[in-house]
Image (spheres, rainbow, N blue to C red):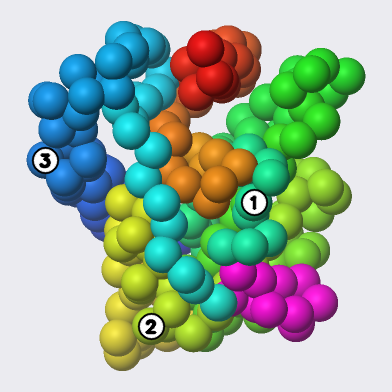
Amino acid sequence: MTHMTGKGSTLVLVLIAALAAAGGAWLGTRLFAPDAAESAGREVPALDVATVLPEAKALEAFDLIDFELNSFTREQMKDRWTFVMIGYTYCPDVCPFTLAHLNTVDKLLEGSDLGKDTSFLFISVDPRRDDPERIKDYVGFFNRDFFGVTGEPEALTRLSRDLGLIFEVPESPESEDYAVGHSAYVALIGPNADIQAYFRPPFEPPKMVDAYRRIREFRSPS
């Protein structure tokens, strides 16, 4: 895995922080309307490590490519709960740290009632360098049960905006060792292919598992 050093590393960290902040502001103004919780008639759980949407937000249709060069659409996300992150395989810090934490979450869920229908998805927003085989090897290094996909730039942009996650790929990079700025949040998608919540860094797997359980209890029919 290529690592950015010196000014490149500093630049990507600053950019990621700025993008994460912008993403948080967008979420706050677009998704968390003050009257949404009241209309739902239930108290939205206040969590240390995640923000729960008062009402789930359905994902629009999308079409990406999986490990085996097969189409990956929102239909594949139904009937399961999925932790979703965006990133790229050359990421020097945020992506490997996040995948390592998600691997721990997966291990903590093993054998539990929640683990049976929980998935983890890595979306590469750098298709110029990340082909499906590379993504498979990269994601498999952390957990062979995790999924990885990518797609055309336009499709990735539409989906990331729909997810409330943002990224920026250099249009004309000076070398192949370029950095991609991207949101560090992890989106939680429900069994109807809808956004349920966002986990925010710094990630703490035990707290994430507890929050995940509370989110599912909140969404369960009364």
Q: CA distance from mark 2 to mark 1?
A: 23 Å
Q: In this figure, which residue is indicated by the disc labeled 3?
A: 29
Amino acid type for the residue under numbered disc 1: Lys
User: Can residue 56 be seen here?
Assistant: yes
Does 1 sit left or right of 37 as displayed?
A: right
Residue type for callout 2: Glu
Judged left or right of residue 179, residue 27 is left
Amino acid, disc 3? Thr
Quadrant for residue 166, please give it.
bottom left
Q: Residues within 10 Å of mark 2 (few under 14, many from 20)?
A: few
Is disc 1 placed on a helix, strand or loop?
A: loop
Whether residue 200 appears in this view of the structure is no
* Residue 172 belongs to magenta span: no
> Is the residue 156 above or below the residue 113 in the image?
below
How packed mark 3 is, by other alpha carbons closer than 10 Å (few <14, some 14-19, many 20 or more), is: few
Closer to the chain start, of discs 2 and 1, is 1
| Rendered view: 123 above or below 21 | below
* Residue beneath the point at 52% across and 43% down: 189
Which mark, residue 154? 2
Foreground disc of the pair 3, 2: 3
- Give the x, y percent position of residue 210: 58, 11
Question: For mark 1, what is the residue?
Answer: 78
- Closer mark to the observer between disc 2 and disc 1: 1
- Dot 3 falls on a residue whose secondary structure is helix
Q: Position of residue 94 (x, y in %)?
A: 47, 45
Q: Percent x, y for residue 135?
A: 69, 67
Give the mark nearer the N terminus: 3 vs 2.
3
Q: Which residues are magenta?
A: 64-73
The residue drawn where x is 53% and y is 51% is 193
Residue at horizontal 55%, vertical 47%?
192
